[in-house]
């Protein structure tokens, strides 16, 4: 009796959310599946991505997960606490060295202030904000597609800033930061879409166009990134004006 051959799985074609390439696509989890504990929500976000983009995000994803899951603010979050052992095992693997090279290169032991201001002997490191921002930009592009149903146009860009720097930026901008304050207030009062304890986001449209949007990304119970979309080469968000009706 002969064996039955299984037909090869047909590859899907479509448009990559990130680069716009047309061709074979894969499902990219946003945020990555590795950011969730073993028992993850069933409705994880997926978007169409070409293989080159999907695979190219791996190193920044690993770096972002290590930092976001090991910061003091995440301690006590159920998803983070369950994931902690897995992240620590990953961090010591030889295969992880390339992804985490910039992390280990800046790792130092020194007396550092705790959240209460007490100096304690602890390990510290310099955060590679370029890599963290790239991770936040990627997530925002995917969420834009999820909410809008189409990819962010090529003549638009995503700006991302870590939440810890927002107050400093607003103070530096002075009165010209009124628009940013307004959009942050709108985000704080908008619907928070959550996936377990690991990830959540809020978003609001700008009054100045369909592709202008504002986002707050939460990881392990903390609002960590403020992101916005705007035309490339045009005004910064703090100088954006509300259009007259």
Image: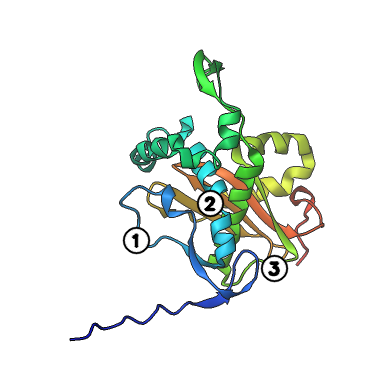
Query: Where is residue 157 drawn, in percent x and y?
Result: 71, 58
**Residue 188 visible in the snapshot:** no
Which disc is residue 42 wearing? 1
Q: Measure how far apart labels 3 and 1 are at the Cα level.
A: 30 Å
**Closer to the camera in the image, 173 or 162:** 162
Q: Residue at 37% across / 51% down in the picture?
A: 196
Residue for badge 3: 153
Q: Badges 3 and 1: C-beta atoms under 8 Å apart?
A: no
**Closer to the camera in the image, 26 or 18:** 26
Query: Where is residue 116 drawn, in percent x and y?
Result: 50, 19
Residue for badge 2: 58
The crowd level at tag 1 (other Cα within 10 Å; few <14, some 14-19, many 20+) is few
**Closer to the camera in the image, 42 or 208:** 42
Instruction: Work out which quarter of the rendered image holds the C terminus and state it.
Output: bottom right
Q: Is residue 91 above or below residue 10?
A: above
The crowd level at tag 2 (other Cα within 10 Å; few <14, some 14-19, many 20+) is some
Q: Is residue 238 above or below residue 125?
A: below
Q: Is residue 69 above or below residue 6?
A: above
Q: Badges 2 and 1: C-beta atoms under 8 Å apart?
A: no
As drawn, which residue projects farthest toward the front? 1
């Amino acid at each position: 009796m002969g064996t039955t051959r299984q037909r090869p799985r047909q590859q899907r074609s479509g448009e990559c959310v990130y680069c716009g390439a047309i061709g074979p696509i894969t499902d990219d989890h946003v945020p990555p599946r590795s950011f969730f504990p073993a028992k993850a929500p069933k409705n994880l976000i997926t978007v169409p991505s070409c293989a080159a983009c999907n695979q190219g995000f791996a190193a920044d994803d690993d770096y972002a997960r290590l930092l976001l899951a090991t910061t003091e603010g995440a301690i006590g979050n159920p998803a983070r606490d369950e994931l902690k052992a897995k992240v620590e095992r990953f961090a010591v693997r030889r295969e992880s060295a390339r992804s985490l090279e910039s992390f280990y290169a800046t790792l130092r032991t020194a007396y550092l202030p705790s959240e209460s201001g007490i100096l304690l002997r602890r390990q510290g490191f310099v955060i590679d904000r370029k890599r963290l921002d790239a991770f936040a930009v990627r997530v925002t592009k995917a969420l834009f597609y999820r909410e809008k149903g189409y990819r962010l146009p090529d003549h638009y860009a995503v700006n991302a800033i870590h939440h810890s720097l927002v107050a400093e930026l607003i103070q530096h901008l002075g009165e010209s930061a009124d628009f940013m304050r307004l959009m942050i207030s709108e985000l704080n009062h908008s619907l928070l879409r959550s996936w377990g304890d690991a990830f959540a986001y809020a978003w609001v449209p700008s009054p100045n166009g369909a592709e202008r949007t504002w986002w707050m990304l939460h990881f392990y119970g903390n609002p960590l990134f403020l992101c916005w979309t705007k035309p490339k080469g045009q005004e910064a968000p703090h100088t954006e004006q509300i259009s007259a009706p």
